[in-house]
């Protein structure tokens, strides 16, 4: 019975995974917050100090406030102010009880920082992957009744970053593009996905055919010791053991001889059965050695059952037929044993080994689950890219050295680094604007160096 608890821990767990669908970012969470809360939002814009941007600063602010996230919010629901010094904004953060969203333009209108009120940010002690806690479990004390009004609207499967930060970032980016393109009607959509712990489940429908394979294994191991029954009972009838004892042979050696003989046969039989069930995909996601050990323990127990049975039977004529009959009955009832309560199966397994092997195989199959066949394919693959730039007429500087990485077909990636670290060069190489000194960019199996036209056609550029 102890094996029923221990053996599943020796198996190789494989769990199915699912990914949540991407959703289109539209800022609807903020739009639905205009009905009831104590105080309006404050959108604070810190404009660049450079005087050449003063003439268009109000234009960029107006374009931002025309963003999609503000369209369904009444004018009374928020206010916005402009400043020219970040220290003014910091003072407001300290003294105001409003929820403040700061948009700080650094040196120009194309380089900005979004600064959210600290009440919007998840605490550092929480693991953001997965981020599934409802807002009332995270913030015990709110700065206003806004959270109390908003908590019923919050999707628990989405992070606060997605709800607040991303829509604002979209509005700012959209405003910058409108300004650069001189097109006030320009709009674009963003699809967001969230990293999270995958769903896990097990499905044992493909792991074990209870009605065919399991009874066959149970019966096969029960029928194999039939020769032991015949040997021992036949020995009783002809009194072979007594003759050996009279000749000076220890009776224990006589019993050990047939035990060793049939144990060796069982080892080969177990290996053959393990290989067979592996070939027919009966063993899925489980190391064959585990089943070999399980079959070994069960095989030895059937030898013991055969020995005990042979001790109680006196006549070979009836013993063999009755043993075969009992083996067949056990085979036919094996699937019904699966429906017995687990605690009862554990108790019965300590007395009757077929119950133990039936329960053990079921426990393993349920815990392990089905095969998770996943194939990974890189959409982009940067293959050993190298690039040197001339610093002087004689010296070259290595900007990129043996850069290789893959980008999955449905993956999200980013390239970060300090200015001058070769990021822009790598991006231009990946776009086909610059040729590397060596290496190549592979897009969906096509090389950028030789199939650039096909690649552009695939992604819709031409």
Image (cartoon, grey):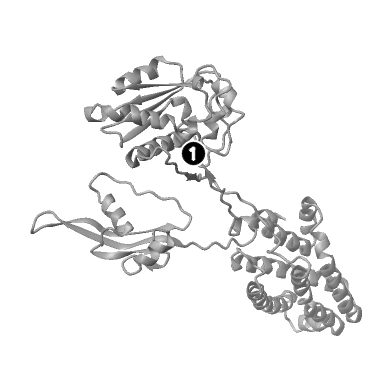
Please determine whether, in this image, residue 187 is positioned above or below residue 206. Answer: above
Instruction: Depth check: give the residue in front, 371 or 61.
Output: 61
Quarter of the image with the C terminus in it: bottom left
Residue 281: which quarter of the image? bottom right
> Residue 245, how many percent across, how many down?
77, 80
Quarter of the image with the N terminus in it: bottom right
Residue located at (22% from left, 30% from top): 52
**Residue 349 at least partly seen:** yes
Residue located at (43% from left, 64% from top): 444
175 to the left or right of 261? left
Please determine whether, in this image, residue 453 is positioned above or below residue 80. Answer: below
Residue located at (85% from left, 85% from top): 238
**Residue 48 at least partly seen:** no
> Residue 302, how many percent across, how many down?
76, 70
450 to the left or right of 68? left
> Residue 350, how many percent across, how many down?
77, 58
Please determine whether, in this image, residue 144 is positioned above or below residue 187. Answer: above
Q: Which residue is mark 1?
A: 128
How many neighbours does mark 1 have within 10 angstroms: few (below 14), some (14-19), or many (20 or more)?
Answer: some
Residue 114: which quarter of the image? top left
Instruction: Depth check: give the residue in front, 273 or 197.
Output: 197
> How many numbered discs?
1
Instruction: Depth check: give the residue in front, 217 or 308.
Output: 217
> Residue 242, how many percent across, how many down?
81, 81
81 to the left or right of 208? left
Residue located at (29% from left, 65% from top): 439
Say which element carries label 1. loop
Residue 276: which quarter of the image? bottom right
């Amino acid at each position: 019975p102890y094996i029923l608890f221990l053996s599943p821990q020796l198996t190789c767990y494989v769990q199915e995974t699912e990914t949540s669908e991407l959703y289109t970012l539209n800022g609807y969470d903020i739009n639905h917050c205009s009905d009831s809360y104590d105080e309006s939002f404050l959108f604070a814009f810190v404009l660049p100090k450079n005087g050449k941007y003063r003439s268009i600063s109000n234009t960029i602010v107006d374009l931002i406030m025309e963003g999609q996230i503000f369209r369904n919010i009444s004018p009374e629901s928020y206010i916005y102010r402009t400043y020219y010094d970040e220290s003014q904004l910091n003072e407001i953060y300290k003294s105001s009880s409003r929820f403040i969203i700061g948009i700080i333009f650094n040196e120009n209108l194309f380089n900005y920082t979004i600064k959210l009120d600290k009440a919007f940010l998840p605490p550092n002690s929480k693991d953001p992957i997965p981020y599934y806690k409802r807002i009332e479990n995270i913030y015990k004390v709110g700065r206003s009744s806004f959270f109390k009004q908003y908590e019923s609207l919050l999707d628990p499967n989405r992070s606060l970053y997605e709800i607040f930060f991303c829509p604002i970032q979209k509005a700012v980016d959209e405003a910058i593009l409108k300004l650069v393109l001189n097109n006030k009607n320009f709009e674009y959509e963003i699809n967001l996905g969230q990293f999270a712990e995958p769903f896990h489940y097990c499905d044992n429908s493909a792991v074990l055919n209870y009605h065919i394979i399991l009874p066959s294994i149970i019966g096969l191991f029960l029928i194999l010791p039939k020769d032991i029954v015949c040997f021992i009972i036949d020995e009783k009838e002809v009194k072979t053991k007594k003759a050996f004892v009279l000749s000076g042979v220890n009776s224990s050696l006589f019993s050990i001889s047939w035990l060793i003989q049939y144990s060796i046969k069982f080892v080969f039989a177990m290996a053959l059965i393990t290989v067979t069930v592996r070939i027919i995909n009966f063993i899925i996601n489980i190391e064959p050695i585990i089943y070999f050990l399980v079959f070994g323990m069960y095989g030895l127990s059937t030898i013991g059952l055969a020995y005990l049975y042979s001790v109680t039977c006196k006549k070979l004529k009836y013993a063999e037929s009755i043993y075969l009959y009992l083996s067949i009955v056990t085979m036919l009832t094996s699937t019904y044993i699966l429906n017995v309560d687990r605690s009862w199966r554990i108790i019965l397994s300590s007395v009757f080994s077929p119950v133990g092997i039936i329960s053990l195989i079921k426990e393993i199959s349920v815990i392990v689950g089905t095969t998770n066949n996943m194939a990974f394919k890189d959409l982009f693959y940067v293959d050993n890219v190298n690039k040197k730039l001339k610093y002087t007429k004689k010296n070259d500087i290595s900007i990129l050295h043996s850069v290789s990485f893959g980008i999955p077909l449905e993956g999200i990636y980013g390239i970060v680094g300090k200015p001058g670290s070769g990021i822009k060069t790598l991006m231009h190489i990946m776009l086909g604007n610059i040729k590397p000194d060596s290496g190549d960019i592979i897009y969906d199996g096509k090389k950028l160096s030789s199939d650039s036209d096909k690649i552009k056609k695939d992604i819709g550029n031409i």
